[in-house]
Image: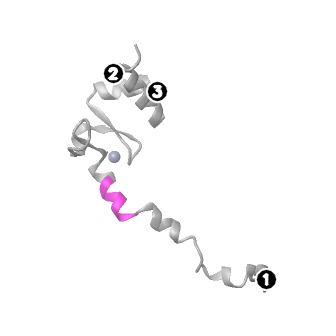
Amino acid sequence: MAGTARGALVATARRIGVSPVDYAHAIALGGKWCVGCKTFHDCEEFGADASRRDGRADMCRLARKRRYVTPKRHRRRGLEPDGGGLAEGPMGRREHS
Ligand SMILES: [Zn+2]
């Protein structure tokens, strides 16, 4: 019975970290998993995306918008160098040539 629609459903549920029962229940109610919010929304919340199997984007419109406003990479870059205190600290560890 491997490779059935049910198997795919269970696999998807595991991947996103919800129980297959909850997942099936949400789908039955017309829901869809949002990878941006990590929760289920009504299908109506998702924009169209022809490249997807179900024809819907994998995150809701709001999550999409939010992602463009605060990209993760940008936040990470803020942690690197030029944070004031660093300049006076570990300089002694420099290589001597
Ligand atoms: Zn969402």
Dominant secondary structure of the magenta stretch?
helix
Q: Residue at the location (34% across, 58% down)?
A: 66
Position in image of residue 42 (x %, y %): 26, 37
Q: Residue at the location (39% across, 47% down)?
A: 37
Which residue carries the number 1 mark? Answer: 92
Which region is colored magenta? 64-70
Q: Quadrant of the N terminus?
A: top left
The answer to which of marks 1 and 2 sits earlier in the sequence is 2
Residue 65 painted magenta: yes
Q: Give the numbered dot on residue 19.
A: 3
Q: Which of 89 and 26 is in front in this view?
A: 89
Q: Residue at the location (35% across, 64% down)?
A: 69
Label 2 is placed on what type of residue?
Ala
Q: Nearer the viewer, residue 51 or 87?
A: 51
Residue 79 painted magenta: no
Label 3 is placed on what type of residue?
Ser
Decide: is 77 above or below 83.
Answer: above
Describe residue 77's horizontal placement relative to residue 97 as left or right.
Answer: left
Describe residue 16's horizontal placement relative to residue 25 as left or right.
Answer: right
For mark 2, give the secondary structure: helix
Separation of marks 1 and 3 at Cα, in angstroms: 53 Å
Marks 2 and 3 in Cβ contact (< 8 Å) = no
For mark 3, give the secondary structure: loop
The answer to which of marks 1 and 3 sits earlier in the sequence is 3
